[in-house]
Amino acid sequence: MPRIGIIGGSGVYGVFEPKETVKVHTPYGRPSAPVEIGEIEGVEVAFIPRHGKHHEFPPHEVPYRANIWALKELGVERVIGVTAVGSLREEYKPGDIVITDQFIDFTKKRDYTFYNGPRVAHVSMADPFCPEMRKIFYETAKELGFPVHEKGTYVCIEGPRFSTRAESFMFRQYAHIIGMTLVPEINLARELGMCYANIATVTDYDVWAEEPVDAQEVLKVMAENNYKVQELLKRAIPRIPEERKCGCADVLKSMFV
Ligand code: ADE
């Protein structure tokens, strides 16, 4: 049974050869795609392409609940979310990796919870990311010589549109990076007592920066980011301990009302 689940985009394709593809039906419908099971450096992992095999789910339509439920059902305890993000700060440069440690939710209408009643639960979100995985990813990225930030606050917007300049200036006061997919993936993983870590790769400066986005440059940065993410996953995953000492599962103890 895979204990590690990866949810990501095309950047993760090719990091492992799936040995098996599992069609999972959940109470919340089907995941974005059948779950691929394989090994990364001898460690069994499950992978879901967040936006579907053919990129058919935009960020606001991703079946987040089905994805997390499917991974849980397959035995996954730790989820690694790989995301591409924009930068809200000069020092977070295109090509950098961010091991996100906080988030701000600016999404508007998604399915945020498995607890819509009659069972009610309020999950603690003060420190939402798995400290064990964050440390491993940060130290491994440094060891590989990749430009990496140990921390960063991710503002998650609804999308699919990008921000206005006014929004971007506002977000910049509070956050370092901006994307569209972290929420509610992380909320849901936490509600099921799973660890969650985010590897964010910066593709662009958001619109607060005056410079127009160069599509060729973004594509080049994305290709380089994909290489870095794959190397990071290969080196870091075997270092993730089997036994969880992070306390992420303990949130369940204080969750129910
Ligand atoms: N994903 C990548 N770049 C982004 C940006 N500038 N805003 C929102 N999501 C993004």
Image (tube, rainbow, N blue to C red):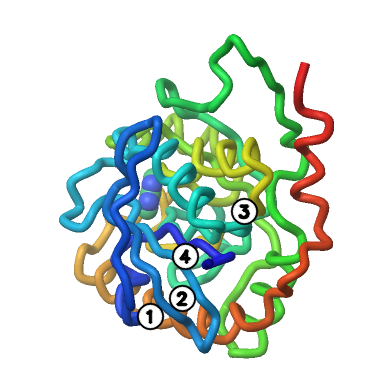
Above or below: residue 194 compared with residue 63: below
Q: Which residue is mark 3?
A: 196
Q: Are marks 2 and 3 in contact (CB under 8 Å)?
A: no
Estimate the spatial distance between the alpha carbons at disc 4 and disc 1, rounded to whole Å: 16 Å
The CB of the residue at mark 1 lies under 8 Å from ligand 1: no
Q: Which residue is mark 4?
A: 201
Nearest to N terminus: mark 4 or mark 3 = 3
Q: Quadrant of residue 80?
A: bottom right
Q: Amino acid at mark 3?
A: Tyr
Q: Amino acid at mark 1?
A: Val
Mark 4, Cα crowd under 10 Å, few <14 / some 14-19 / many 20+, is many
Estimate the spatial distance between the alpha carbons at disc 1 and disc 2, rounded to whole Å: 9 Å
What residue is at 70 percent from the left and 44 percent from the top? 128
> Residue 178 versus residue 128: which sits nearer the camera?
128
Q: Which residue is mark 1?
A: 15
Estimate the spatial distance between the alpha carbons at disc 1 and disc 3, rounded to whole Å: 20 Å
Q: Are marks 2 and 4 in contact (CB under 8 Å)?
A: yes
Give the foreground label among 2 and 4: 2
Mark 1, Cα crowd under 10 Å, few <14 / some 14-19 / many 20+, is some
Q: Are marks 1 and 3 in contact (CB under 8 Å)?
A: no
Mark 1 falls on what kind of element?
Answer: loop
Q: Are marks 1 and 2 in contact (CB under 8 Å)?
A: yes
Nearest to N terminus: mark 4 or mark 1 = 1
Q: Amino acid at mark 2?
A: Val
What residue is at 53 percent from the left and 67 percent from the top? 1
> Disc number at residue 58?
none
Above or below: residue 47 compared with residue 169: below
Nearest to N terminus: mark 1 or mark 3 = 1
Q: Which residue is mark 2?
A: 229
Above or below: residue 190 compared with residue 227: above
> Residue 114 versus residue 134: which sits nearer the camera?
114
